[in-house]
Amino acid sequence: MSEFWNPYLPLAPGRRRALGIGAVVAVLLLWSLLAGSGLVSPVRLPAPWDVLSAFSYLAWHEGESMLFIATLWSVGRLAVAGVLVILIGIPIGITMGAAPKLNAVLSPLIDPFRSAPVVALLPILVMWLGIGEEMKVAFLFIGAVVYLIPMVRDAIQAVPQSYWIGARDLGATPWECITKAVVPMAMPRIADAVIVAFSVMWTYITVAEYVNARVGLGQLIQNARRFSAWDQVFAGIIVIIALALVTYQGMNWAKRRLYPWETQQ
Amino acid sequence: MSATSSPAAVSIAIKDIVQEYPAPSGGVTRVVDGISLNFERPGINMLLGPSGCGKSTILHMLGGVRPMGTKTPTSGSILIDGVECHGAHDDSVMVFQRYANRPDLTVFENVAFPFRLKLWREKIAEKEWRQRVAEMLKAVGLADKQQLRPAQLSGGQNQRVALARALVLRPRILLMDEPFGALDAQTREEMQRLLIDLYKAAPCLVVFVTHDVTEALMLGDRVIVLSTQPARIADDFTIDAPRPRSTEWQRSAEAIRFEERILSQLHKSSAGKGAVRVTI
C-alpha cells in the first residue's frame, strides 16, 4: 500500500492491461448478474447476451449487414468533416497563434463556442442547409473546429520563444520564423488537437444523424429506440465507442511515429 | 552590408545607448543607461555583470533582435562599419544559453538550418554549404554524431551544435549570451577551450556576455564590467596574457589583481544587487 499513492510509479504494461481488462470483466459480470437475476427488468436493462444477439442480427441479417452500411455512412460523414476541420481549422489556429492582433480579433468570435451548446445550433443549420448531408457534415465540423482552433493557437503560443528569436537572428523573415521554426515545434500538440477533434466528432455523430438520416449509426440507434429495441440501442452505442477508441488509438500511434522526439525531451 | 574581401574586418560603435521598458507599475524601467563602446578589431570582448543587469539587452540590440517588439535602443545609436543598424541584420549571429536545437532534426540538419532560409539559400550554393556544414561539424568534434538527434546528445554537445550553426555562416560578429552558463564546470572549460580554438582558426569580433568572473578572465582580450540595473560601464580593461590561459596563470598575481579589480568595481557599483560567479 505504501506505493499506492505514487503518480510516478512505473506500471508494467502487462499489469496495466490486466487491471484494465479486469475492470471491464467486472462490469460485464455485474451487468450479467443484474440482468440475469431478474433484479432489473429486461425492458430497462437488456442482458449482455441479448445485446450480443442484437449485434449479430445487425451485423448480418437476410443477406445484408445493416451495421456495416451504417458504419460506412457514419465514418464517411466523420471523415469529410474531419478533412474540413484539418484544412480550415489548423491554418486559422496557426495564424491566430502567430499574430496576436489576429487572435484578438478572432478569439472572441471562436473561443465562446467551446462552451456554447453546439447541439442548439442544429435547428439553425437545418434552416440554412436543409436536412441533407451538408447539414450533418457542417454540424460535425462546427462541433469539432471550435475545439481544434483554440488548441492549435495554444500549441503555437506554447513554443519557447528561443526558437523564434534564434531563427530571427539567423536571418529568417517573420513568416519563415513561423513556418520553419515555430510550427514544426508545435506539431505534436497540433496532432493532439486533431485527435481531440475526432473524439468530439464521434460524440456528436448521433446528434448529427438525429435529423432525417436514412442510414448511419446514429440513425440505427434512433430507429431502435423508437421500437424500444434497447438491446440494439446498446449494441449501437458500443459500436460507436469501439470505433471512437480505434480512431483514438490509431491516431495516437501515428502521432508517436511522426513525432517521437516529443517524449524524448 | 554583405561580407566583403576580408570577412573579419568589422567595427561596432555604440553611442550613448539607453534602453527603457514600460514598468508593470506604470512609468518606465531604465535597463541600460547611456553606454558608449567601440569595438574596432577582431577579439574576444567580455561583457561582465551581475545577473539581470541588462547585458543581454545590449547583446540583443547588437543583434537587432527585438523579442518584445519594443523600440531598441530607446535612444542612442549602434553603428556597424559606420552604418546605423536598424533591426535584424546578417553581420552577426547569436549563440544563446538555451541552444534552441530542433529536436526533430539531426545534428547535421540543425547545423544546416540557416540554409533552409531564403536569405542564405540565395547567397550560398547547396554544394558549398554542405561542405561548410561538414567542416564545421568536424571542427566542433561532432563529425561522427551528425545523424543523431539532440535528445541523444549531452548538454555540452548540444551547445557545440548551436555554436557550429552560428559559425557555419562565417559571421563577422559573434554574439554569445551566457552560452556556457547552464553547463557543468568541466564541460564549461571544454567549451571555453573549443571556443578559443575556433576563434584562432577564424578570428572575428566576439561579444561574450557572462556573469562568470573566471570565464571573463580566461577568455577575454578585453573585459567590460557593467554595474547592475540600469547597466553602466563600471570598468573596461584589456588582458594581454596569451590564450589558452592555464590554471597557473589563473593563480598568478596578474590574474588575481584583475579578479580583485572586477569584484571591487562590482561591489562599488552594484551594492549587493545581482550576483556574479567565481569558479576556483
Image: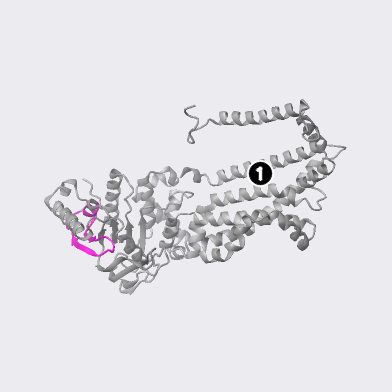
| Closest to the observer, B229 or B163 | B229
Count of numbered circles on the image? 1
Q: Chain of mark 1?
A: A
Task: Look at label 1 and name its amino acid.
Answer: Thr
Figure check: A185 above or below B14: above
Name the one closer to the observer, B180 or A244: A244
Question: Which residue: 67% across, 43% down?
Answer: A244
Q: Quadrant of residue A88?
A: bottom right
What is the x, y in percent for residue B150? Answer: 43, 46
On screen, residue A31 above or below B240:
above
Q: Up-down: is A41 above or below B148?
A: above
**Is A151 on the left or on the right of A239, as rendered?**
left
Q: Give the residue at the far left of this rendering.
A: B253
Farthest residue toward the right?
A: A62
Q: Which scheme is used to colour this image of the protein?
A: one colour
Q: Which residue is mark 1?
A: A247
> Mark 1: few, some, or many residues within 10 Å (few <14, many ≥20)?
some
Q: Nearer the viewer, residue B273 or B107?
A: B273
Horizontal and vertical percent position of residue B139: 34, 51
Q: Quadrant of residue B36?
A: bottom left
Q: Is residue A138 in sight in this rendering?
A: no
Q: Residue furthest front?
A: A39
* Range shown magenta: B215-242
Left/right of residue B237 with respect to residue A253 in the rendered view: left
B189 shown above or below B62: above
Magenta region includes residue B226: yes
Q: Position of residue B111 (x, y in %)?
A: 42, 53
Q: Judging from the image, what secondary structure is the residue with disc 1 in?
A: helix
Q: Is residue A197 left or right of residue A128?
A: left
Q: Does A212 appear in magenta? A: no
Residue B151 visible at all: yes
Percent coordinates x, y for residue B187 in the rendering = 30, 45
